[in-house]
């Protein structure tokens, strides 16, 4: 399993976005972040991605950043999916699923919520709509 750099005990990783620009988790230091690991073939993922799209204005108004990390699919397939579903947030490509494995993702969708201090405060297969504010906006 790959190891990823930690700064002050916090996990960090870099993945390419759909334009092949490297994006690091540390780029969002000091901000709450929602990670969602997903695939295009997963019906539960599609539902969760749509929910995040609907909640996007509310989430970003609160300063939350969303990173949708595709696990193991081709960029062409992901680009087509994103265009068809008009996703509003940043999509990253974990084509070799090393980041997914290092973060303990064994099924999709998986949410990981990180507070502004860089602490992982939630990890599960659903989005905690009622609790997310108290978890990551402290």
Image (cartoon, rainbow, N blue to C red):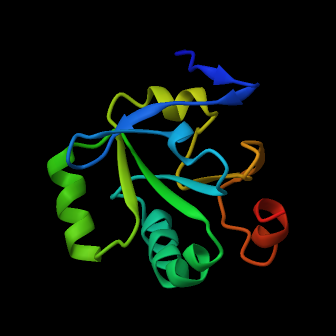
Q: Nearer the viewer, residue 17 or 99?
A: 17
Left or right side of 61 for 15:
left
Quarter of the image for residue 101 reads top right
Residue 121 spot, x, y in % from top left: 79, 50
Q: Nearer the viewer, residue 2 or 26?
A: 26
The residue under the point 71% across, 31% down is: 10
Q: What residue is shown at x 14% (from left), y 50% (from top)? A: 76
Q: Residue at x 64, y 33 (%)?
A: 104
Residue at 79% x, 78% y: name it: 130
Q: Position of residue 138 (x, y in %)?
A: 84, 62
Q: Is residue 32 above or below residue 85?
A: above
Residue 61: % across, % down:
59, 79
Residue 79's image quarter?
bottom left
Vertical arrangement, residue 136 with respect to residue 59, above or below: above
Instruction: Indicate left or right for 135 with 61 as reference.
Output: right
Q: Is residue 134 left or right of residue 27?
A: right
Position of the N terminus by quadrant? top right
Please provide percent x and percent y for residue 131: 82, 71
């Amino acid at each position: 399993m790959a190891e990823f750099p930690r700064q002050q005990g916090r996990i960090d990783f870099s993945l390419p976005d759909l334009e092949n620009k490297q994006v690091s988790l540390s780029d969002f230091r000091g901000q709450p972040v929602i990670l969602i690991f997903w695939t295009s073939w997963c019906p539960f993922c599609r539902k969760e991605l749509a929910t995040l799209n609907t909640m996007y204005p509310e989430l970003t108004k609160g300063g939350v950043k969303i990173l949708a990390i595709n696990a193991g699919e081709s960029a062409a397939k992901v680009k087509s999916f994103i265009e068809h579903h008009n996703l509003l947030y940043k999509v990253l490509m974990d084509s070799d699923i090393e980041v997914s494995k290092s973060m303990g993702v064994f099924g999709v969708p998986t949410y990981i919520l990180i507070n502004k201090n860089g602490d992982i405060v939630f990890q599960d297969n659903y989005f905690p709509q009622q609790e997310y504010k108290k978890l990551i906006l402290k």
